[in-house]
Image: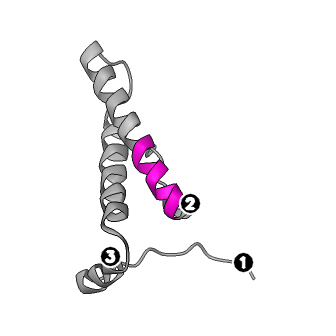
């Protein structure tokens, strides 16, 4: 018997709000910052002009800062830059 990969299931808004209410506000903010920075890093790929390189470096530093806060709370919450797209 082979194990099938887990299928992501959407979480209802009320359940997400209940989960979020159990976490400190600065952790929730760090999670939002990390997700936004990871999305921005994934959009800024390939040959970049100087301004885009600066934007990418800023997004990477924001991601690192947010991940530092998340890892201190729970290392499983860290976010990496997305691949593809």
Dominant secondary structure, magenta: helix
How dense is the environment of label 3, judged by Cα within 10 Å: few (below 14), some, or many (20 and up)? few
Q: CA distance from mark 3 to mark 2?
A: 17 Å
**Is any part of residue 72 visible from this angle?**
yes
Tell me which label, 1 or 3, sits earlier in the chain: 1
Q: CA distance from mark 2 to mark 1?
A: 29 Å
Q: Is residue 70 magenta?
A: yes
Residue drawn at x 31%, y 51% as measured from the top left: 33
How dense is the environment of label 2, judged by Cα within 10 Å: few (below 14), some, or many (20 and up)? few
Q: Position of residue 50 (x, y in %)?
A: 29, 13
Give above or below for 47 relative to 80: above
Q: Determine whether the residue tagged by mark 2 lies in a helix, strand or loop.
A: helix
Q: Determine whether the residue tagged by mark 3 lies in a helix, strand or loop.
A: helix
Quadrant, the C terminus: top left
Mark 3 lies on residue? 20
Locate residue 7 relative to residue 33 in the image: left or right: right
Q: Determine whether the residue tagged by mark 1 lies in a helix, strand or loop.
A: loop
**Mark in the foreground, 2 or 1:** 2
Mark 2 lies on residue? 75
Q: Looking at the image, what colour scheme do you see?
A: one colour
Locate residue 33 relative to residue 2 in the image: left or right: left
Give above or below for 73 relative to 42: below
Q: Which mark is residue 2?
A: 1
**Residue interval drawn in magenta:** 64-73
Q: Position of residue 73 (x, y in %)?
A: 50, 63
């Amino acid at each position: 018997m082979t194990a099938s990969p887990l299928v992501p299931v959407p979480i209802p808004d009320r359940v997400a709000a209940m989960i979020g209410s159990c976490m400190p506000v600065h952790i929730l903010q760090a999670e939002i910052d990390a997700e936004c920075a990871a999305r921005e890093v994934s959009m800024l790929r390939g040959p970049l002009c100087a301004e885009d390189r600066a934007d990418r470096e800023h997004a990477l530093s924001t991601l690192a800062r947010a991940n530092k806060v998340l890892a201190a709370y729970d290392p499983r919450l860290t976010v990496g830059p997305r691949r593809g797209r």
